[in-house]
Amino acid sequence: MENSITETNEEFRVTTSDFSEMVGSNHFNTDLRFMQCHSGNAVIAIDSIEHTFSAQHSFVLSEYMTFQVKEASADFSVTCITISLPFYYEIVAGFDGTILTVLLHSVPELYESSDLQAANLIFENLCLLYENPNHTNRRSMAMNLIACYIYEIYELTLPHFDMESGKNNNSLFTDTILSFYNLVSQYGHQSRNIEFYAEKLNMSSRYLYKIVHNTCHITPKQLIDDVIVSLIKQSLLTTTLNNQQIADKFGFSDQSAFGQYFKRCTKLSPSEFRAK
């Protein structure tokens, strides 16, 4: 049995679980997740590799990974911060691709509890922020805290990372997805065309479709749109460029085409998003 781990349409969400409903089923992770165990222990498999998840353990479960709970003790408890992919892409747009590659190798037993003090403080602040939906700068603070957590886990994971031995059986597909993502981040201002990126990757658009669909359960076009919309949101939130200037920056024929594209992807016009 295979399910997708999904939450609501919230950009980030905090939940607590005992994993009892997940035991024995294989789940496909469709978001980024920060996980922190409070008590008990569980045996989990990430992309078919088993790990022990115990109290004081924290780790990052990256997008597009399979996740299975083999067993969990009666007192097992975990808090999970789930970040939606569009929000995640918006946060990491412009990140060095190496950071995202290393993040794929975060696993529970990799870090000592003493190493996680800074990460745990960031985690706790994200939980507090989630409980305060009326905070004036909630979204901006969440973006910064999530980015800080990613940087901290990256810093802790990097000494254990080995480009060759760290790869799993899906490394070819994973590397292709990361390369595709990085290319869209780099060239999204000039192309939204699948063939453009397939050519950059030296493969046919049909083969790129197969890799993305089989690995991510979305189409290459959906991934392109997610990344480009995240880049557009960044321009809307962090620059004084008007809609026409952003339309020009991202290669739209006119402001109307830009507005239609953004609204189709987000349900909001660029002006509505910026005002919100």
Image (cartoon, rainbow, N blue to C red):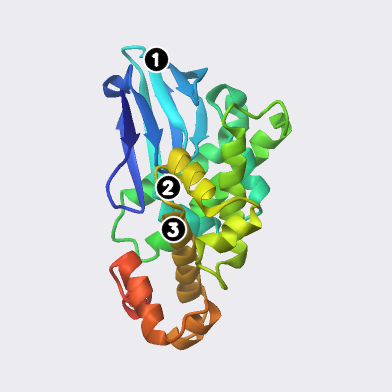
Looking at the rendered structure, the secondary structure element under dot 2 is helix
As shown in the figure, which amino acid type bears the numbered disc 2? Leu
Question: Is residue 254 visible in this depiction of the protein?
Answer: yes
Looking at the rendered structure, the secondary structure element under dot 1 is strand
**In the image, what residue occupies the spot 29% across and 56% down?**
133
* 174 and 161: which is toward the camera: 174
Residue 103 is left or right of residue 40, and the answer is: right
As shown in the figure, which amino acid type bears the numbered disc 3? Lys
Q: Image quadrant of residue 3? A: top left
For the residues labelled 2 and 1, the Cα–Cα distance comes to 29 Å
Point out the frontmost of discs 2 and 1. Answer: 1
Point out the frontmost of discs 3 and 1. Answer: 3
**In the image, what residue occupies the spot 54% across and 69% down?**
191
* Disc 2 residue crowd, few under 14, some 14–19, many 20+, Cα 10 Å: many
Q: Earlier in the sequence, mark 3 or mark 2?
A: 2
Residue 262 is left or right of residue 169, and the answer is: left
- The image's mark for residue 116 is none
Give the labeled residue for mark 1: 70
Q: Position of residue 22 (x, y in %)?
A: 31, 23
Mark 1 and mark 3 in contact (Cβ < 8 Å)? no
Give the position of the C terminus as an image quadrant.
bottom left
Give the position of the N terminus as an image quadrant.
top left
Give the labeled residue for mark 3: 221
Q: Earlier in the sequence, mark 2 or mark 1?
A: 1
Looking at the rendered structure, the secondary structure element under dot 3 is helix
